[in-house]
Image (tube, rainbow, N blue to C red):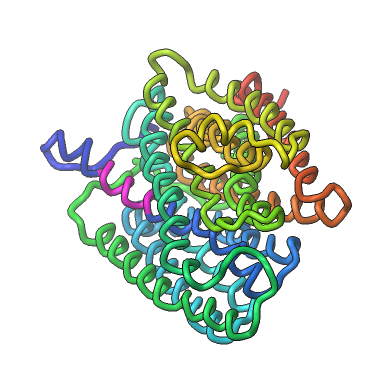
């Protein structure tokens, strides 16, 4: 059964207003998600955390998906996709306010709980908005629509770390080093007002999703579905199951590239560590722009996924084998334009953003292809794959502790890109386990 978008007789509204709604949701998701890359090294320095302890800040955000994925899908079926977006935003806004007592008490436990609850909110929002985008038009051009949404998401990822550095970090800390209690108090207090403003902004987006006269995505047979039975039915589709695995492994490497780059910069003594996530997001923006221009006119979704896997493997090897005393990339791309001189391995981590850009947009439509009324449940399962984001930083932290070092630990990304290659070549075509 195909999905439809409920709308009035205005054709333009049926096309553009849903895109505006979805685009605003992807923007706020980007603001919340990619703030992790800036806040993690900040809290790592303020609370004097080890790299492994700091990885829990990111992991707690993503582990929420494991708990909230299927419940989110059931909630969306009951309240609708548009209301689901509003509920997800409201949960994130209330969770952001938890940063106030966390900062006042300087307790990592409260920070982790706040991160967990924000993760629950973003899971609800993701479960609602992704199928909304995929199913509002042709499946062949779905990757292009997801790319457009991704541009907004990653644009937020570019500007949020810069704003965080200017508003919170500037004038509070100066590079790495041991801090006095007075400096820690200044850092903690600098978090309060920004998170109050973040909560207020997200509530505005919640109100927009709830009250704007915009169409909703519906499936004719949704009301006749059975929760557990439908999950089993969805899991009988190999291309979906493998897609969930692909999403999990992809999110693991995406989070490593975006959210650990700041911690790596802190460890090698780069003063502006809090803006490093912006470099990764800028590379992803370039990748999304290329996807919009080339898919499906010059390149299929499957080809884009294949190229992403190959690029990921090559770039990871450059990260691991590169020298922190080499500045070739920045001397070519940054310094001539007034940018900073940064080590090649650090910039290769950012370049992973380019390799990763097309993976999410390609896997979603390939995994949802032909599922019809199962799309809502399948979306919930795919969203659960975001829990892979909890695994990535932990693997980096454990690799560091195990003796691979901050740089060598990035080798753990290789198996993820190998699986992405498999899904592009064969996995997405599988309609039977036999």
Is 412 displayed left or right of 344 in the figure? right
Q: Residue 370 placed where, x, y %?
A: 47, 28
Most extreme residue toward the top, as rendered?
A: 298
Is 242 displayed left or right of 8 in the figure? right
- Residue at 57% x, 31% y: name it: 355
Is residue 233 visible to the viewer in this orientation of the structure? no
Q: Residue 331 placed where, x, y %?
A: 57, 33
> Is the magenta region chiefly helix, strand or loop?
helix
Is 211 displayed left or right of 78 in the figure? left
Number of dots carrying numbers:
0
The quarter of the displayed image where residue 97 is located: bottom left
Q: In this rendering, is residue 112 above or below 425? A: below
Out of 42 and 398, give the one closest to the viewer.
42
Q: Residue 256 placed where, x, y %?
A: 64, 47
Q: What stretch is highlighted in magenta?
A: 18-27
The quarter of the displayed image where residue 208 is located: bottom left
Task: Give the quadrant of the C terminus.
Answer: top right
């Amino acid at each position: 059964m195909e999905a439809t978008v409920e709308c009035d007789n205005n054709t333009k509204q049926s096309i553009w207003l849903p895109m505006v709604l979805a685009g605003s949701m992807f923007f706020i998701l980007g603001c919340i998600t990619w703030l992790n890359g800036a806040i993690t090294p900040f809290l790592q320095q303020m609370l004097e955390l080890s790299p492994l302890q700091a990885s829990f800040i990111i992991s707690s955000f993503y582990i929420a998906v494991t708990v909230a994925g299927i419940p989110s899908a059931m909630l969306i079926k009951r309240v609708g996709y548009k209301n689901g977006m509003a509920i997800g935003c409201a949960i994130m806004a209330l969770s952001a306010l938890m940063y106030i007592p966390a900062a006042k008490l300087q307790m990592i436990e409260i920070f982790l709980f706040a991160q967990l609850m924000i993760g629950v909110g973003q899971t609800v929002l993701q479960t609602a908005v992704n199928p909304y985008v995929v199913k509002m038009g042709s499946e062949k051009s779905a990757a292009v629509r997801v790319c457009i949404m991704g541009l907004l998401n990653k644009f937020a990822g570019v500007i949020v770390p810069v704003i965080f550095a200017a508003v919170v970090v500037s004038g509070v800390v100066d590079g790495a080093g041991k801090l006095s209690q007075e400096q820690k108090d200044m850092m903690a207090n600098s978090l309060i007002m920004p998170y109050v403003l973040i909560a207020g902004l997200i509530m505005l987006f919640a109100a927009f999703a709830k009250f704007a006269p915009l169409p909703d995505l519906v499936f004719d047979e949704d009301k006749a579905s059975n929760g557990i039975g439908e999950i089993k039915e969805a899991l009988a589709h190999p291309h979906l199951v493998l897609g969930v695995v692909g999403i999990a492994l992809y999110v693991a490497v995406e989070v490593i590239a975006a959210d650990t780059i700041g911690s790596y910069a802190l460890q090698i003594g780069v003063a502006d560590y809090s803006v490093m996530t912006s470099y990764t997001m800028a590379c992803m923006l370039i990748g999304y722009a290329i996807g919009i221009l080339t898919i499906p006119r010059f390149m299929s979704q499957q080809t884009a996924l294949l190229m992403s896997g190959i690029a990921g493997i090559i770039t990871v090897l450059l990260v691991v084998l590169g020298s922190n005393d080499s500045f070739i990339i920045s001397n070519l791309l940054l310094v001539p334009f007034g940018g900073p001189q940064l080590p090649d391995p650090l910039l290769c981590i950012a370049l992973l953003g380019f390799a990763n850009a097309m993976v999410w947009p390609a896997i979603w439509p390939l995994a949802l292809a032909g599922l019809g009324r199962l799309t809502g449940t399948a979306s919930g399962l795919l969203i659960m794959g975001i829990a892979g984001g909890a695994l990535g930083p932990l693997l980096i932290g454990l690799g560091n502790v195990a003796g691979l070092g901050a740089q060598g630990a990035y080798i753990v990304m290789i198996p993820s890109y190998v699986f992405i290659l498999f899904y592009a070549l064969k996995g997405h075509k599988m309609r039977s386990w036999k």
